[in-house]
């Protein structure tokens, strides 16, 4: 029998009520304002670009396996679509709030623009704990959420992708749900799909590959060697584990990696293949025996050349930024550094390759996937990787040149490149009235 059911643990405070510095939307806007100031952006455009175009909150009722009904909350935010269809991932997490989704949607707008893709930005999420849900429950949640936001979706309007706790299996369900509504198969409605059903070769590794490429460029810029460079990675999911793998392939030495529970550290470098085998088998790093165990907080302040935060946002703040010893920070995650920490890192001479550039490899190959789906013609892996490499290297160089020319950090330079591109399209299109 089905009956309504609520549990108190699902009620949590909105981040809106927290201090500004902890609010991810404010954190993003602080950077936007600084870049807009340097660009001398006209006040009207500033106002337009400070507001998300569309925000949707949906109730997502599903039947649990035990027959009980539960109602989850889902969000989808279209931040800006001036340059093309909105593009942005979907996350399933207890920490999801509207403010976080808004910030992530804005980031997607700047990210697509910084690598010059013909996309706007969006993001979505459902407040849930997927680790407590069965595959059947996750499928019902994904399909019901998709039908809740279906009016926003479409290859020409809004194209989701995987993010934290969502994967290609869920993208397949989104594609199927959308296609059943449209009465024909629409592969280009979502990216990050399995390759067998219109996904792109190289998509799964693309974000990590992009992180590796920009880290290599940053080391070159600083005239530091690549071989033997020490790397510490926070987060050992899609982005973290693949960044670590590809950096190790380049000859870098991975000193430490971590997951939600904590990290493992070896001063001479981890045997990454062994760690990957362990995680494949046991899921967690905490049972790995051949390294020292450290906390996520300790991991961030290890003595290293490169730090790759690739888990969640706001892990580098004004409280720990002063203790960071890396020469380069490559932001695999979205928003890992709070706005307050930026100045501290800059004063310490740490080169921060900002999220909107560092992790743009994923959306770049998502764009390739969308192009391949629409063209109905698929590329080999070599073509995908070489086109990704070209875009990541030229985008890095554009941001580095902007930073040198205007004497700002790489982060502000990347925002300037991105905002300038979005603003230019707004000026050309004019304001519809
Ligand atoms: P994922 O779910 O595959 O992995 C997340 C990892 O972070 C896991 O190892 C998890 O254990 C760890 N983690 C979670 N909470 C943590 C905490 N509090 N402290 C330390 N570690 C923690 O997710 P992902 O796809 O690798 O995404 C990671 C980040 O990269 C997110 O910020 C996401 O928005 C961003 N990102 C992902 C992609 C992509 O293509 N997957 C693209 C761009 C940006």
Image (tube, rainbow, N blue to C red):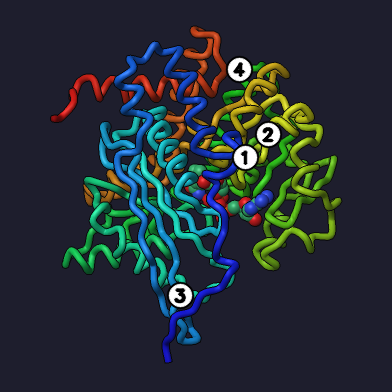
How far apart, in angstroms, are the residues tagged by discs 1 and 4? 26 Å
* Circle on res. 314: 1
Of marks 3 and 1, the one in the foreground = 3
Where is 349 relative to 48, above or below?
Answer: above
Where is 225 relative to 195, above or below?
Answer: above
The residue labelled by disc 4 is: 221
Q: Are marks 2 and 1 in contact (CB under 8 Å)?
A: yes
As helix, strand or loop, the secondary structure at mark 4 comes to helix
The residue labelled by disc 3 is: 70
Bin the neighbour count of mark 2 within 10 Å (Cα to Cα): few under 14, some 14-19, many 20 and up: many
Bin the neighbour count of mark 4 within 10 Å (Cα to Cα): few under 14, some 14-19, many 20 and up: few
How far apart, in angstroms, are the residues tagged by discs 4 and 3? 52 Å
Q: Are marks 3 and 1 in contact (CB under 8 Å)?
A: no
As helix, strand or loop, the secondary structure at mark 2 comes to loop
Where is 308 relative to 62, above or below?
Answer: above
* Circle on res. 317: 2
Precedes in sequence: disc 2 or disc 4:
4
Where is 107 relative to 290, above or below?
Answer: above
Precedes in sequence: disc 4 or disc 3:
3
For label 1, being within 8 Å of ligand 1 is answered: no
How far apart, in angstroms, are the residues tagged by discs 3 and 1? 30 Å
Bin the neighbour count of mark 3 within 10 Å (Cα to Cα): few under 14, some 14-19, many 20 and up: some
For label 4, being within 8 Å of ligand 1 is answered: no
As helix, strand or loop, the secondary structure at mark 3 comes to strand
Q: Residue furthest left?
A: 433
In the picture, the quarter occupied by the N terminus is bottom left
Q: Position of residue 384 (x, y in %)?
A: 40, 41
As helix, strand or loop, the secondary structure at mark 1 comes to loop
Q: Is residue 54 visible?
A: yes
């Amino acid at each position: 029998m089905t009956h309504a059911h609520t549990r108190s643990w699902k009620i949590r405070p909105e981040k809106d009520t927290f201090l500004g510095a902890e609010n991810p939307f404010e954190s993003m806007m602080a950077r936007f304002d600084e870049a807009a100031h340097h660009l001398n952006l006209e006040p009207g455009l500033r106002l337009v670009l400070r507001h998300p175009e569309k925000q949707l909150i949906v109730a997502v009722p599903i039947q649990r396996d035990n027959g009980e009904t539960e109602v989850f909350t889902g969000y989808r935010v279209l931040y800006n679509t001036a340059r093309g269809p909105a593009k942005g991932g979907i996350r399933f997490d207890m920490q999801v709030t509207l403010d976080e989704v808004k910030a992530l949607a804005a980031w997607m707008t700047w990210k697509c623009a910084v690598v010059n893709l013909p996309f706007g930005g969006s993001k979505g999420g459902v407040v849930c704990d997927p680790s407590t849900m069965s595959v059947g429950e996750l499928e019902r949640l994904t399909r019901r959420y998709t039908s809740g936001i279906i009016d926003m979706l479409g290859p020409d309007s809004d194209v989701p992708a995987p993010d934290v706790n969502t994967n290609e299996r869920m993208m397949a369900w989104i594609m199927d749900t959308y296609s059943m509504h449209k009465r024909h198969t629409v592969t280009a409605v979502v990216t990050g799909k399995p390759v067998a059903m219109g996904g792109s070769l190289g998509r799964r590794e693309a974000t990590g590959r992009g992180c590796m490429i920009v880290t290599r460029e940053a080391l070159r810029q600083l005239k530091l060697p690549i071989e033997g460079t020490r790397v510490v990675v926070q987060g050992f999911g899609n982005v973290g584990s693949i960044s670590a793998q590809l950096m190790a392939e380049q000859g870098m030495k991975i000193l430490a990696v971590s997951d939600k529970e904590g990290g493992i550290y070896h001063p001479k470098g981890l045997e990454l293949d062994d760690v990957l085998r362990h995680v494949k088998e046991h899921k967690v790093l905490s049972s790995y025996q051949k390294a020292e165990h450290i906390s996520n907080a300790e991991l961030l302040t290890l003595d290293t050349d490169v730090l790759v935060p690739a888990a969640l946002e706001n892990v580098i703040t004004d409280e720990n930024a002063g203790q960071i010893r890396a020469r380069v920070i490559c932001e695999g995650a979205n928003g890992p550094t709070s706005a307050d920490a930026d100045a501290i890192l800059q004063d310490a001479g740490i080169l921060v390759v900002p999220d909107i550039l560092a992790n743009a490899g994923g959306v770049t190959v998502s764009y390739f996937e969308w192009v391949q789906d629409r063209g109905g013609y698929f590329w080999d892996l070599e073509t995908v990787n070489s086109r990704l490499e070209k875009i990541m290297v030229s985008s890095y160089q554009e941001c580095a040149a902007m930073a040198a020319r205007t004497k700002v950090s790489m982060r502000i330079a990347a925002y300037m490149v991105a905002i300038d591109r979005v603003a230019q399209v707004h000026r050309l299109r004019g304001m519809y009235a």
